[in-house]
Image (spheres, rainbow, N blue to C red):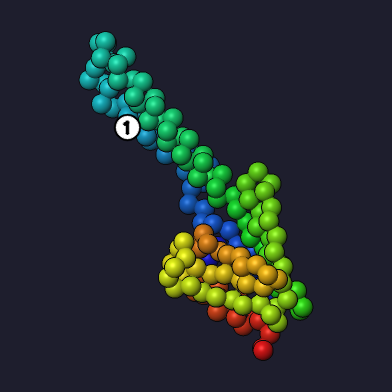
Amino acid sequence: MPYRWSAPDRLELWPHQALSRRGFARVIAGFAGLGLLPLAGVLGTGALWGLLPFLGLALAGLWWGLRRNARDREIREVLETRPGLWRLQRLGPGDRRAQWQGDPFWLELRLHATGGPVPDYLTLRGGGRRVEIGAFLSPAERRALAQELRRKLPAK
């Protein structure tokens, strides 16, 4: 699962990492190689120069899309569950940071089966605000996380 308890009171969450640097290079090289195969039939003709820019645009689009996806996967969430204070920090790409904190006694943990931007949307409410946690996780992972967090909440 893309989350773990790094300490008894510290939970770290991150998006799935499906493509490594080596995988990125393989995808780009494979796409370029397969894209050049159909052009072998027009080598030495003027048609090659008419088709080559389209291959270049497609390759540039794939490169940009994979790079953008890698940047979006740089998100990290850290939840500290100390007695008397829960603190959630969201660390985004480009050093963007957001922080929320609340008293665990007054905290409301909700798993929204429907109505959220994703199925089984998990939110924490307290301190006058509602924040999402683990929106990049799969629905099954959010359900499991909700059960773990409920066990950490103090009995009311």
**Residue at position x 62%, y 83% in the image:** 151
Q: Is residue 3 visible?
A: no
Q: Amino acid at mark 1?
A: Leu
Find residue 12 and report its horizontal and vertical position in percent: 64, 64
Horizontal side of residue 53 vs 65, given as left or right: left
Secondary structure found at label 1: helix
**Residue at position x 39%, y 27% in the image:** 57
Find residue 114 and report its horizontal and vertical position in percent: 42, 70
Horizontal side of residue 87 vs 131, given as left or right: right
Q: What is the residue that sits farthest to the front in this orientation?
A: 128
Find disc 1 in the rendering and name its residue: 34
**Residue at position x 48%, y 35% in the image:** 64
Q: Nearer the viewer, residue 6 or 101?
A: 101
Q: Is residue 33 visible?
A: yes
**Residue at position x 55%, y 50% in the image:** 73
How crowded is the residue under tag 1: few (<14 C-alpha within 10 Å), some, or many (20+)?
few
